[in-house]
Image (spheres, helix red, strand yellow):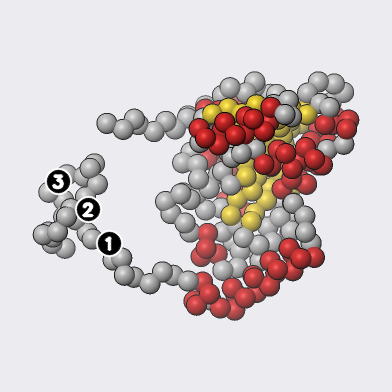
Amino acid sequence: MHHTNGPSLLSPSLPRDTPSVPFVRTATRWDVRRCEPLLYALRGAFKTFRHRFLRRDKLAALVGRMLRDAAGGTAEGPIRLVDVGCAQGGLTLRVAERLPRRVANRFQPIGIEISNHLAKLADLALCGQGGHCIHGTGIDGLGDVERGSAHVIVLSGTLEHEIAPLALLRRCRERLALDGRIVVKVPNHACVGRGHAYRWPDRVNHFTPQTLAAAARAAGLRVVRMNAFDRWPLSDSLYAVLGRDASVGLETVEPTIAYRPRKAA
C-alpha cells in the first residue's frame, strides 16, 4: 500500500495521513446468471410460474387476514394498522380494498415514512382511509403511536435496512395490542442462489428463518407463523407473523434505544 499522487479518496472522518486505496472501477460485476446459471434458471422459472398461475398479493392478503382476526376479537373501537416504512401508502390501499365492510368501517391506518416527499404522498393517501402518516424513522415514528394500541404492525422491506433492528422490534412490541400481530417481510438469505441478497450499503442486515426467529425472541416476541411457503427456499422473500410473548414481562425487555444519526458538520 502506498500514497497516490492523484486525487484523495479519503473519508473526511479519517486522518489525512492515511493512505488512500483507489477503487477498481473496471472490475466485472458479479452476475448470478453467469456464476450460477442453473440456480438462476430454476428461480426464474418458479417466479414466472408464480406470477402467471398463482397471482396474488401475499403481503396484502396476510395483513388483511390479521386485521379481520383482530376485528373478530375486538367488539368495538378502531382496528389500527401501522405500516413502518410505508412509502406512498400503497400497501394500505391494497389492504383496504380487501376488507369486508364490518372491518373497513373500523379501519384506522397509520403510516411511518422517513422520506419527507413520500410521507406527504402517504398522508394524502391514508387521509382518505381515515388515517395519517408520521414523518420519521421507524423507531421515532412508533414513539408517536399509543402504547398497546396497534392491532397489526407491518415491517415490509424495513428490518434489512434498519441499523438497530432489535430496538425497532422492541418498540413494535411496546406499541402492539395484547393479541396484536407484526407482519414481517425481509429478503430470504437462506434461499437458493442467495448472492443477490447482498446489497450494500442499504442492506445492513441479512436474515434467515433462524436468525429472524432469534431476533424476535430477543425482543420479547414469538413466531406465530412461518410455514414452509413463508420460507420457501426458491423464493427471495421471507415472511413471518410475530406476536407478544406472554411469558416475557414488558419490564424484563431491555429499554428501546433509538438510533439518531449525527448532524452533518
Q: CA distance from mark 1 to mark 2?
A: 9 Å
* Residue 209 in sight from this viewpoint: yes
Q: Earlier in the sequence, mark 3 or mark 1?
A: 3
Bin the neighbour count of mark 1 within 10 Å (Cα to Cα): few under 14, some 14-19, many 20 and up.
few
Q: Is residue 142 left or right of residue 73?
A: left
Q: Is residue 13 left or right of residue 87?
A: left
The quadrant where residue 264 appears: top left
Amino acid type, residue under disc 2 in the picture: Leu
Q: Quadrant of the N terminus?
A: bottom left
Identify residue for label 2.
9
Q: Nearer the viewer, mark 2 or mark 3?
A: 2
**Secondary structure of the residue carrying numbered label 2:** loop
**Secondary structure of the residue carrying numbered label 1:** loop
Q: CA distance from mark 2 to mark 3?
A: 10 Å
Which of these two is toward me, 204 or 130? 130
Q: Earlier in the sequence, mark 1 or mark 2?
A: 2
Q: Earlier in the sequence, mark 2 or mark 3?
A: 2
Amino acid type, residue under disc 3 in the picture: Arg
The quadrant where residue 245 appears: top right
- The residue at 79%/62% (across/down) is 54
The quadrant where residue 183 appears: top right
- The residue at 76%/65% (across/down) is 52
Whether residues under marks 1 and 2 lie with C-beta atoms below 8 angstroms apart, the answer is yes
Q: Position of residue 235 (x, y in %)?
A: 66, 62
Q: Position of residue 105 (x, y in %)?
A: 84, 27
Q: Position of residue 199 (x, y in %)?
A: 47, 56
- The residue at 81%/20% (across/down) is 77
* Residue 253 in sight from this viewpoint: no
Identify residue for label 3.
16
Identify residue for label 1.
23
Which of these two is toward me, 89 or 219? 89
Whether residues under marks 3 and 1 lie with C-beta atoms below 8 angstroms apart, the answer is no
